[in-house]
Image (cartoon, rainbow, N blue to C red):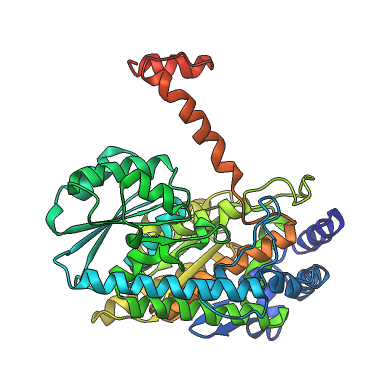
């Protein structure tokens, strides 16, 4: 986005500074219809965002100027849009076949072959005495599988109980392993490089607890290192590739623990739901493209309104881990301060994403959302149909979702300033027909493509993550200091090490 485009959006925001959301709804006949989209199992309503028709047209014009349609085509065709690392970005090929480009076709074929291998491994495990699976990974090797496995597992245990270890804190591994029987447990080590400190340390704990590597599987882009580090037989190693970023990888063999938790067929349905949304994102015109609508709305809130935070509220307890998953997807992708060409961005990029599950969070941080000095735009996500037998509870849950979005938008006056609600808090409501593998796949694909839209607008690379490396590098240099083998150069760090008794 150029400085002039940024200035144009900000001028629209200034023009609308005194307009309430209720007034926007009153002044714009057809506003709800224009800002509501139904795509497969997803419905999204943006009518409570703080833009009017003129401002929205300016956002759409920005999208046209940037040729978002062509940008999507470059993504699907496997052009090396991850320019800082010289890589294609082909997570869409893991779940669908929407490109005639040779690189995309080959990626889709390769992914299908690996998925078939994964299915065979699952079948073999199903005939074994294994009852529990421990999945070891961190970041994209953990957050996606953990979210989907938790969201889609039934009320009763399936064939396998799947457990996750990510944090390098030994207490995490201890708590997971303590109630399990090593004779009836298998493990999956997931690491793209097989050089991730947390995964190597936790993997060693699990290997020793199991008494060997006979029931350890691996998913890695470096299978040789996986075999060398843990003596894992090649037939128990599934590949991943450099054209799939970690936070986009749950659709690949990284989804092995998902398929074990919910069943292989349902894992394939998850991919189908994402592929259906992929087709929409690629083919729908900007005006009716849900990913574009969501992405441009995020740009408006960040750059025109200057809002530095974004909340995600899931009014379905099964989606309680979604905010944590989206924190990585959005903030690791968009937490950049320079454009692809290395020049500084114009304005700000990603806000801080956070959230939780309603109705719990209403008794936690909603006080600040309703009456705090800062405005936090939010996505409210619910399901139309519930799978549990408690209809009264579901009605109460939905009434709270509806009430919170209405109250945040409209507020309520009072002569007592302590009881006054200013309103004007924008939100988007997203409804899933039901929480199924297909609908969850579509929802996650929608967020992926929204992130891509924002990256194109800001001119940044959404597919590298160099920012996560510096802290890791410094930690490696400090390990000898903690063990008394060297001294820390930073004086504050040196004092803290002394306080730690090292």
Left or right of 14 in this view: 327: left
Left or right of 249 in this view: 466: right
The residue at 59%/42% (across/down) is: 467
Q: 423 and 298: which one is in front? A: 298
Residue 400 visible in the current orientation: yes
Where does residue 424 sit, x and y in percent of width and height? 61, 63
Where does residue 355 sit, x and y in percent of width and height? 46, 57
The residue at 66%/48% (across/down) is: 336
Q: Name the quadrant containing residue 47.
A: bottom right
Residue at the extreme right: 4
Where does residue 179 sit, x and y in percent of width and height? 14, 51
Q: 396 and 352: which one is in front? A: 352
Residue 410 visible in the current orientation: no
Left or right of 347 in this view: 131: left
Q: 350 and 242: which one is in front? A: 242
Give the quadrant of the C terminus.
top left
Above or below for 426 versus 343: below
Above or below for 264 versus 249: below
Q: 101 and 154: which one is in front? A: 101
The residue at 67%/66% (across/down) is: 453
Left or right of 70 in this view: 448: left
Q: Name the quadrant containing residue 359.
A: bottom left
Q: How many marks?
A: 0
Give the quadrant of the N terminus.
bottom right
């Amino acid at each position: 986005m150029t400085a002039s485009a940024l200035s144009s959006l900000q001028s629209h925001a200034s023009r609308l500074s005194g307009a309430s959301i209720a007034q926007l709804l009153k002044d714009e006949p057809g506003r709800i219809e224009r800002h509501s989209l139904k795509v497969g199992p997803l419905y999204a309503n943006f009518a409570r965002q703080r833009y009017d028709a003129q401002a929205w047209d300016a956002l759409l014009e920005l999208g046209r100027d940037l040729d978002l349609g062509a940008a999507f085509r470059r993504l699907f065709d496997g052009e090396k849009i991850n320019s800082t690392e010289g890589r294609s970005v082909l997570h869409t090929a893991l779940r669908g076949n929407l490109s005639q480009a040779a690189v995309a076709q080959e990626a889709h074929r390769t992914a299908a072959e690996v998925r078939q291998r994964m299915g065979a491994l699952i079948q073999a495990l199903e005939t074994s005495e294994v009852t529990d699976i421990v999945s070891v990974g961190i970041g994209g090797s953990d957050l996606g599988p953990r979210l989907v496995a938790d969201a889609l597992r039934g009320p009763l245990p399936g064939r396998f109980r799947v457990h996750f270890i990510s944090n390098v804190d030994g207490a995490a591994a201890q708590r997971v392993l303590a109630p399990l029987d090593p004779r009836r447990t298998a493990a999956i080590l997931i690491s793209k490089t097989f050089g991730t400190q947390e995964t190597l340390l936790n993997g060693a704990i699990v290997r020793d607890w199991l008494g060997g590597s006979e029931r350890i599987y691996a998913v890695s882009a470096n299978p040789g290192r996986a075999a060398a580090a843990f003596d894992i037989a090649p037939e128990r190693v599934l590949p991943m590739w450099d054209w799939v970023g970690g936070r986009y990888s749950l659709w690949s063999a990284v989804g092995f623990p998902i398929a074990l938790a919910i069943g292989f067929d349902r894992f394939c349905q998850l991919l189908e739901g994402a592929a259906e949304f992929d087709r929409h994102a690629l083919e729908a015109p900007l005006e009716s493209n849900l990913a574009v609508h969501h992405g441009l709305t995020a740009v408006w809130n960040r750059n025109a309104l200057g809002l530095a935070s974004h909340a995600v509220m899931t009014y379905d307890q099964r989606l309680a881990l979604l905010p944590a998953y989206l924190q990585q997807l959005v903030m690791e992708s968009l937490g950049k301060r320079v454009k692809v060409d290395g020049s500084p961005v114009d304005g700000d990029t990603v806000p801080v994403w956070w959230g939780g599950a309603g109705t719990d969070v209403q008794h936690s941080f909603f006080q600040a959302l309703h009456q705090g000095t800062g405005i936090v735009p939010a996505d409210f996500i619910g399901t139309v149909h519930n799978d549990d037998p408690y209809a009264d509870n579901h009605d109460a849950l939905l009434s709270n979702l509806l009430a919170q979005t209405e109250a945040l938008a409209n507020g309520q006056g009072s002569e007592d300033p302590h009881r006054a609600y200013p309103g004007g808090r924008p939100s988007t409501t997203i409804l899933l027909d039901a929480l199924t593998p297909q609908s969850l796949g579509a929802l996650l694909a929608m967020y992926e493509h929204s992130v891509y839209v924002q990256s194109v607008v800001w001119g940044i690379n959404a597919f590298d993550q160099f920012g996560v490396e510096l802290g890791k590098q410094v930690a490696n240099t400090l390990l000898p200091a903690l063990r008394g083998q060297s001294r820390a150069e930073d004086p504050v760090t040196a004092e803290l090490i002394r306080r730690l008794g090292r």
